[in-house]
Amino acid sequence: MARGQRAAILALGWGCCLLLCCAAASEVEVSMPALVEVERGGTARIECNFHIPGNGSYAFINWFYMDRTNRVRLYHITSRETLEEDTSYKGRLSLGEDKALSISGVTLQDSKTFVCQVGAGSYGVDEKHTELRVYKIPEAPEITASSGGISVQNSDTSEIAQCVSRNSFPPPNITWHKNGEQLEESPEVKLTFTRTREASGLYTVTSSLFARVRRQDRHSRYHCAVHYRLRGRAHTLESRRVNVTVFYPAEHVKLQVMPSSTLVKEGDDVQLVCEADGNPAPVFSFYKRELEDWQDLSTLAESGVLNLHGVNKSSSGLYRCQTLDLDDLRQLEEDVELVVNYIEGVQVNMEPSSTLHEGDSVRLSCDAYSPVDLDYHWRDEKGKKVAEGNQLFLSNLTFETSSNFSCKVVAPSVPGLERSKQVAVAVQGKPRIVAISSPLYVQQDQVVNLTCKAIAYPKPSLRWSVNGTAHEYSDNQHIASNLTVRVSHDLLRAGARCKVSNAFGVTEQHIQLLVDSARKDQTTAESKGVIIVAIIVCILVLAVLGSVIYFLHKKGKISCGRAGKQDITKPEARKDKTLVDVKSDKLSEEAGLLQGANGEKRPAADQSEKYIDLRN
């Protein structure tokens, strides 16, 4: 019996379920999205999908929006007409072919619930609703760091920065981050948050960060981030990174000589740079140890830098930098030793130190003092290196070797440290004539230049034995003179004398003037050569003319009698004889003249014979 009852109950249950399913399958069904999000100013499209059994048609469709608890109809749609109600939405509504509702130019006030109701006669009525959510993406956050410094000695929290994000809907959240890590509320971190609704309906959110700072926070970077959700997803906008000025006392001080890469030498500009790791920088004071006291040099310093211009040997010593923190009045100090490398006492000695003459020898010695090793180089007055070492030996001196020699003292371990001392090696003596224009070939009444050049020390004077226009030049021990004169009979006979003198004596030389006969010979030879060339040309022309006449006669081109032939033949015979005479008597001489006319040089004997022939 119990088993039978259970079976009956099960059969009844299955029957009821079947009836319910059949009933549901026989009714109209409406489906709509639960949420539609659209940005302010855009167009919202709300779909209404429905199913009628047997592909039946709807009897009506109504669109509503919920105004608090009341329904306000927007559209009434039948198969014959579409009626839009007179509401505040009129002019912004439209229907699609699928009866979807579109709202253009949405505002924040359009954030409401919209209902779609479908009636299908015997299949009943069904409706669903969609929540329309209007949003406005927030603007990127703007961060402003604290303009004043924050001291690590503050026992309370101080404002680090403020963050603002404007024109958003709904209002977003703001988080703070330090060196990329999010900050949370704690005894050392305080966060404030305010939200303001503007007249436009949009929100402005503001947050401030308060925190205690440590020394290491001088390098910290802070930023804020705005967080909002859209279409079920989280979004974030970040601000730029900022840091704040942190005040902290100095713990260490460092004093160094700049530039530190090279050794200091006399004449350098040096800076003593004092650095402390406090902020703000403490007050710096500089001192130099003088015997048992410290000399205050603070008036020469500025912003922790002591400038020393053109240091020298006396600039070496112990220097001190002292700092004073104005917050806790704590003092720190650091010392540094300044070493200025130098070269002093450069001297050049000459042995013998008495007067030097040509042929003598001399030894030059160079000495100097420096705390570092030194090298010695000798150079002449042109800068050419002539020796190394602290001694220079010069032998067989002449006026030409007289010069200014310099001893250059160099410190190899200190780049740029060097000194020089110059000494004059003067060879004294009687003047010596080194160049003179003798012998000089001239012509009568010709204007010529007589040249004389001498060397001596002390500087000599130069005089000529004849009158003329003199141009004198001098260079160190050298003296030179050019005398312009006209050649006269007396000058040809006596010549000229160049006389050079100084305190050690007089030197003179004679300039011999000779008549230049070669120039006359050359002129005569050239004239004779021209005459001979003319004669040869005439002979060649006559020979060619005779050959042409003879050729025409043989060919019968010229017809004439016997007497005519004799007249023609006789001159030819005479002409041939003349040619033979010329060739036999004059050939060698003409060849010699032609050679002279072409400018080739001939022996003196040939020239003499030539002059004799011309006179005869």
Image (cartoon, rainbow, N blue to C red):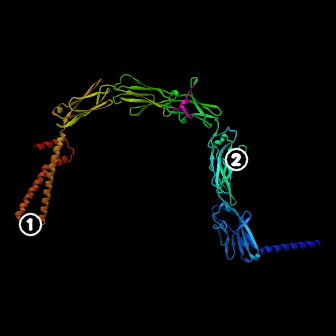
On residue 191, the disc is: 2
Is residue 486 left or right of 290 when viewed as pictured? Answer: left
| 320 in the magenta segment | no
User: Which mark identifies residue 336?
Assistant: none
Of the residues shown, which amino acid type is indicated by label 2?
Leu
Magenta: main secondary structure equals: strand
Instruction: Please state if 136 lies on the left or on the right of 2 as rendered.
Output: left
Q: Which residues are magenta?
A: 294-308
Q: Which residue is mark 1?
A: 559
Q: The residue tagged with tag 2: helix, strand or loop?
A: strand
Q: Position of residue 344 (x, y in %)?
A: 48, 26
Magenta stretch contains residue 307: yes
Compared to residue 594, the image places residue 135 above or below, namely below
Above or below, 87 against 377 in this view is: below
**Side (left or right) of 498 relative to 80:** left
Q: Is residue 106 visible?
A: yes
Residue 153 quadrant? top right
Which quadrant of the rendered structure holds the C terminus? top left
Evaluate whether residue 241 shows in this view. Answer: no
Work out how far the residue at label 1 is from the one at label 2, CA to CA, in angstroms.
Answer: 147 Å
Marks 1 and 2: which is nearer the front? Answer: 2
So how many labels did they put on this image?
2
Q: Residue at left 17%, top 42%?
A: 521
Q: Residue furthest front?
A: 86
Tell me the amino acid under the disc marked 1. Ser
* Position in image of residue 197 (x %, y %): 67, 54
Quadrant into which the N terminus falls? bottom right
Disc 2 packing (10 Å; few <14; some 14–19; many ≥20): some
